[in-house]
């Protein structure tokens, strides 16, 4: 596993939070993207080496809607950049982690993504991501 690629934050209103993070970080989001399959609208901020993803639910069945209902707004996941997502899935399964989607799926920001169940990771949802262009 490489560096933390981004932190994901669940928000009620992407518009309001975009404004807030723009003020906080001094930069506008560099990308806005809807991931229909996940029921989310996202925005990405970059500050120095670090990236923040804001996520708003687009429907009530969205994992983000459920998260906010249960825990309120806040940090939703930590995403790690990996060089070989398939090899990491295999390795982590062997270590006893629960992989939520065995086959990497297309996430936001041009990434293949896989999530690990928070039950096996101290209550923190972990995302693994790999740049789509870097996979064969
Ligand atoms: Zn993410």
Image (cartoon, rainbow, N blue to C red):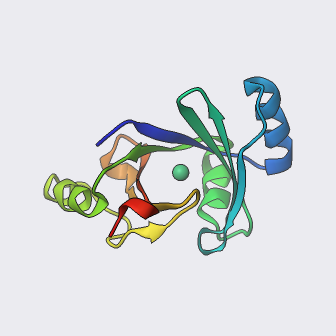
Against 26, residue 95 (above or below) is below
- Total marks placed: 0
Residue 114, percent across and down?
Answer: 39, 61
Q: Residue furthest left?
A: 94
Image side of residue 109 versus residue 87, left or right:
right
Residue 14, percent across and down?
Answer: 79, 49
Check the picture and name the quadrant holding the C terminus.
bottom left
Residue 47, percent across and down?
Answer: 63, 29
- Residue 29 appearing in the image: yes
Against 26, residue 91 (above or below) is below
Residue 20, percent across and down?
Answer: 81, 33
Image side of residue 8 versus residue 78, left or right:
right
Task: Using the image as rendered, state which of residue 119 and residue 87 is in the foreground.
Answer: 87
Residue shown at 44%/63% (left/top)?
A: 132
Residue shown at 66%/68% (left/top)?
A: 39
Task: Using the image as rendered, state which of residue 82 and residue 73 is in the foreground.
Answer: 82
Task: Using the image as rendered, state which of residue 73 and residue 5 is in the foreground.
Answer: 5
Task: Using the image as rendered, state which of residue 44 and residue 56 is in the foreground.
Answer: 44
Image side of residue 95 versus residue 118, left or right:
left
> Quadrant of the rendered structure where residue 73 is?
top right
- Residue 113 appearing in the image: no
Check the picture and name the quadrant holding the N terminus.
top left
> Quadrant of the rendered structure where residue 129 is?
bottom left
Residue shown at 68%/59% (left/top)?
A: 65
């Amino acid at each position: 596993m490489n560096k933390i690629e981004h932190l994901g934050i669940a928000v009620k209103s992407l518009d309001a939070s975009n404004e807030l993070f723009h003020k906080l970080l001094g930069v506008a989001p560099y990308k806005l993207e809807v991931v229909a399959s996940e029921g989310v609208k996202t925005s990405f901020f970059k500050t120095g080496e670090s990236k923040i993803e804001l996520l708003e639910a687009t429907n009530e069945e969205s994992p983000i809607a459920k998260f906010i209902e249960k825990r309120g707004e806040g940090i939703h996941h930590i995403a790690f950049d990996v060089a070989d997502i398939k090899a990491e899935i295999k390795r982590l399964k062997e270590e006893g982690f629960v992989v939520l989607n065995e086959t990497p799926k297309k996430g936001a920001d041009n990434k293949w993504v896989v999530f690990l169940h928070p039950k096996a990771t101290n209550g923190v949802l972990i995302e693994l991501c790999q740049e789509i262009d870097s996979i064969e």
